[in-house]
Image (cartoon, rainbow, N blue to C red):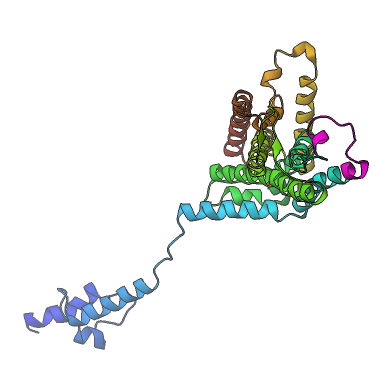
Amino acid sequence: MSPSEIPEATAPTVTGPSASGPSASGPAASSGPSASGGPASSGVVGGASAATVTRAAPVRPSAGRHTVALFASELHLVFGRARTWVTLAVLAGVPVLVGVAIRLSGSEGGAEGFIGQIAGNGFFLIVASLGLSLPFFLPTAVTVVAGESLAGEASLGTLRNMLTAPAGRSRLLAAKMVALAVFCLSATMVIWVSGLIAGVALFPVGDVVLLSGTTVSLADGLLRAFGIAILVALSLLGLAGIGLFVSSLTSTPLAAMAATFGAFIVLGILGAIPQIDVIHPWLLMYGWTSFADLLRDPPYWDAIVRNLWIQAAYLAVFYAAAWARLTSRDING
C-alpha cells in the first residue's frame, strides 16, 4: 500500500461525524474527503447545523411581561371574586338608602352638616355618603380584601407556586398592594357614582354653596366631590398596608381579616380617649375627615397634606414589614 492511500483510509475514523456512524469501509468513508474537510464533510455538518437551528430553545418572555401579567392576574383575582362585587353592591346601596330615607322623611328632617343639605341639593348626597361610609363600611371592605390577599393564596396552596414564579416575591407583593389600591379607589368611586345618580333622581340639583359660603357651579362642585373620593381612597391605604402585613403572617383568611379589623378598632378606641390626646395626631384615622376642607374656597390643604403623610407612613412601615416577612421565609401553600 502506497503512502498516498493511508490518509483516505484512516481519516474517517478520526474525524467522522459520530462514533456510532458507519464504519470506515462504508460508502461515507470511501467517498469522504481527508481530515482537512471536504465537500462531503461539510454537507454532514451543514445538516447537523440545520437540525440544531430547528430545535433551538424558545425565547422566554421578558421580566417586564411577567410583571404586567402578574399585575393583571392580581386585578383579575381581586375583582373576580363574588364577595368583591357583593361588597361593591353594598357600598353602592349606601347613597340610595340615605337618599330614600331623607326623601321619605321630607326636607324638614332637622339634620345638620352635609345630610341636612341633601334635600335642598342632591349634590351633597355624594359627600354625605362618602362621609357616612368612611367610619365603618369602607374600612370593613378594605379589611376583607386585604386580609385575603396573601392568606387566601396560602390557604389554597397557590402561594408557594407564585413565590417561585419568574416575577419574584418583591413584584408579587407590589402587585398585591396595587390591586388593593385599585380596590380602594373603585370602592369610593362606586359611592360617588351611586350618590350622583341617586341625588339627581331624588332631589333638585344646582349650584353648590361651599362651607366657606362661596357659591360655585355644579361642575365645580362635582370636581371637588371627585377629589374627595380620591382623598378618601388614599386615606384607606394605611389600613390596606396593615391588612397586607397581617395577611402575610397567616394562612387563614378569616384570621387575617379579624386581626386587621381588630387593629382598626383598637386605633379607633385610642382616638376616642381624651387622656392620650398627645398621640391622636399620629393615629391612622385622625385626619380622615379632612376631605371636607376641599369644600372651602380656597381649600384648606394643611390637614389634607398631613393626613396623606400619615397614610404614607403607615403604608411604608407595614409594607416593609410584609416585604421582610415574604422574602425571608417560606410560606407553606
| Residue that lies at the very extreme toward the bottom in this rendered image | 27
Q: Quadrant of residue 41?
A: bottom left
52 with respect to 293 (left or right): left
Residue 76, position as x, y percentages in the image: 65, 55
| 320 over 275 or under it: above or below | below
Residue 153, position as x, y percentages in the image: 69, 48
Give 169 or 199, whichever is nearer the viewer.
199
Name which residue lies at 89% across and 43% down. Answer: 101
Decide whether residue 106 is among the magenta residues: yes
Which quadrant: the N terminus?
A: bottom left
| Residue that lies at the very extreme toward the top in this rendered image | 275
Residue 72 visible here: yes
| 2 over 161 or under it: above or below | below
4 with respect to 28 (left or right): left
Total labels drawn: 0
Q: Quadrant of residue 134?
A: top right
Decide whether residue 241 is among the magenta residues: no
| 16 over 293 or under it: above or below | below
Residue 13, position as x, y percentages in the image: 23, 76
Residue 252 visible here: no
Give 312 or 117, whichever is nearer the viewer.
117
| Residue that lies at the very extreme toward the right in this rendered image | 105
324 with respect to 141 (left or right): left
Give 104 or 77, whichever is nearer the viewer.
104
Residue 244, position as x, y percentages in the image: 67, 38
Name which residue lies at 92% across and 45% down. Answer: 104
Q: Quadrant of residue 325?
A: top right
Q: Which residues are magenta?
A: 101-118
